[in-house]
Amino acid sequence: GALMILAPKALYTVHAAGVAAWHLTLIQDQQLAGLIMWIPGGLVYVIAVSFVFVKWLAEPDRRTPSRRAALVPVAVLLLTVPLIGSCNDHGSHAVASATGDPQHGAALIRQFGCGSCHVVPGIDNATGVVGPSLMQVGRRIYIAGVLRNTPNNMVRWIRGPQQFVPGNAMPDMGINQPDAQDVAAYLNTLR
């Protein structure tokens, strides 16, 4: 389940037709399936360990009569540890900073006309409706539903979106590596 949630791309593309009926992307469907497998599957292990632990505490031992008193805190700890790990802010999945110059990236976004297709916060007249809004793109977990949102993957996407999602509306713009790093650095500030 964890592998399915954290996979950088869809593992089972054969499910694309069924996923469309639920208005989900392949990645969203895969993450949901992984979550269902991970949490209930993990609970089975927690219940089994708790049962063994309770049986161990129930063994008579006259030297330490306070073992039973430890049952409640330990059981609470065993049940809450998996829940604590799932309390992350979605924005914490992305790498905090990209290498590049965000100010130059903003100028490049204007120069390449990204705002004719995307809504880009902080860029004048960037009100396009062809591509998705880039509002809070720095907090997103995935780029185009197929790439983990990291600065390096954002650079890869900017330089060659067709290689990841052939036929999508975003053209290969011929942006070089340093310019793509600057654009990715600006996009990473949109949180």
Image (spheres, rainbow, N blue to C red):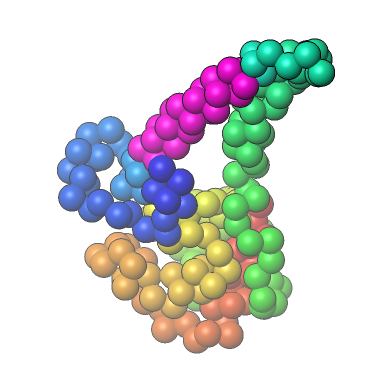
Residue 119 seen in the figure: no
Relative horizontal placement of residue 113, taking residue 26 as reference (left or right) = right
71 lies above or below 19: above
Q: Residue at x 62, y 76 (%)?
A: 182
In the figure, residue 81 lies in which quadrant?
top right
Image coordinates of residue 178 in percent, x first then y, are: 58, 85
Q: Position of residue 169 (x, y in %)?
A: 32, 63
In this view, 149 is above or below 73: below
**Residue found 59% across the figure and 77% down from its top:** 181
Residue under the point 22% across and 34% down: 21
Question: Residue lying furthest front in this view?
Answer: 62
Name the image quarter holding residue 138: bottom right
Rendered location of residue 35, percent (x, y): 44, 36
Say whether residue 21 is left or right of residue 72: left
Q: Overall secondary structure of the magenta stretch?
A: helix
Q: Give whichever of 40, 7 is nearer the camera.
A: 40
Q: Is residue 180 magenta?
A: no
Q: Is residue 34 magenta?
A: yes
The foreground one among 187 and 36 is: 36
Front one among 5 and 61: 61
Which stretch appears magenta? 31-56
